Structures are given as structure tokens and as C-alpha cells.
Image: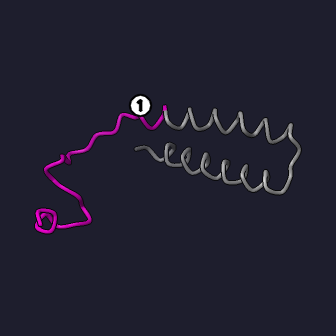
Amino acid sequence: MKSYIHKLVVFTTAFLVIYIVLAHYGLSFTALFAMCIAGQAFTICMAYKVLTDDYKTDKTFDDSYEDKPVETLED
């Protein structure tokens, strides 16, 4: 994935965490509603960008997981 997609994921996550914190502290309904709509738009945009990214890899499912050796997966 390109670096701008990673930045978009981090931005969307941070925005939604800030939204939750501000909702806890009692921000006005109008501001929370606007942030809610913006958060949904960011989430949809993020999902679209991640799913339509032209990402290529040479790994296959036969390569197994990178964090565990193949021998332990067959146990």
C-alpha cells in the first residue's frame, strides 16, 4: 500500500477516537452530529481507498504466516 493510504487510516482512526472523547465531555449536539457524519464519510473513503489500491505482492497462501514457522502450523 502507498504511504498516503496508511496516513488516511491513521487520520480516520484518530478522528474517530477524538470524536468519542469529545462526546464523553459533552460537546454540543450540532458539533457531534457534524463529526459523526464526517467520520462516516472518512470511514467509507478509507475503506474504498484500501480495497481499490493497486497493491501487488509475491507472497501466496503457501508461504504461510510470517510470524510462525511452517512446522508449528501443522501440529
User: Mark 1 falls on what kind of element?
Assistant: loop
Q: Quadrant of the C terminus?
A: bottom left
Q: Is residue 43 left or right of residue 55?
A: right
Number of numbered tags placed on the structure image: 1
Q: What's under tag 1, amino acid-wise? A: Thr
Indicate the quadrant where residue 39 lies.
top right
Q: Which residues are magenta?
A: 48-75
The front one of 44 and 28 is 28
Residue 19: x and y, percent?
73, 49
Indicate the quadrant where residue 42 lies.
top right
Residue 1: x and y, percent?
40, 44
Q: Residue at left 41%, top 31%?
A: 52
Q: Residue at left 54%, top 47%?
A: 9
Q: Magenta region's main secondary structure?
A: loop
Q: Is residue 67 left or right of residue 29?
A: left
Whether the magenta-drawn stretch holds residue 50 is answered as yes
Q: Is residue 59 left or right of residue 35?
A: left
Q: Is residue 28 above or below residue 64?
A: above
Q: Residue at left 83%, top 57%?
A: 25
Residue 34: x and y, percent?
78, 35
Whether the magenta-drawn stretch holds residue 24 is answered as no
The front one of 72 and 53 is 72
Q: Is residue 20 above or below residue 67?
A: above
Binning the other alpha carbons within 10 Å of mark 1 as few (below 14), some (14 to 19) or many (20 upward) gives: few
**Residue assigned mark 1:** 52
Q: Residue furthest front?
A: 75
Q: Is residue 29 above or below residue 26?
A: above
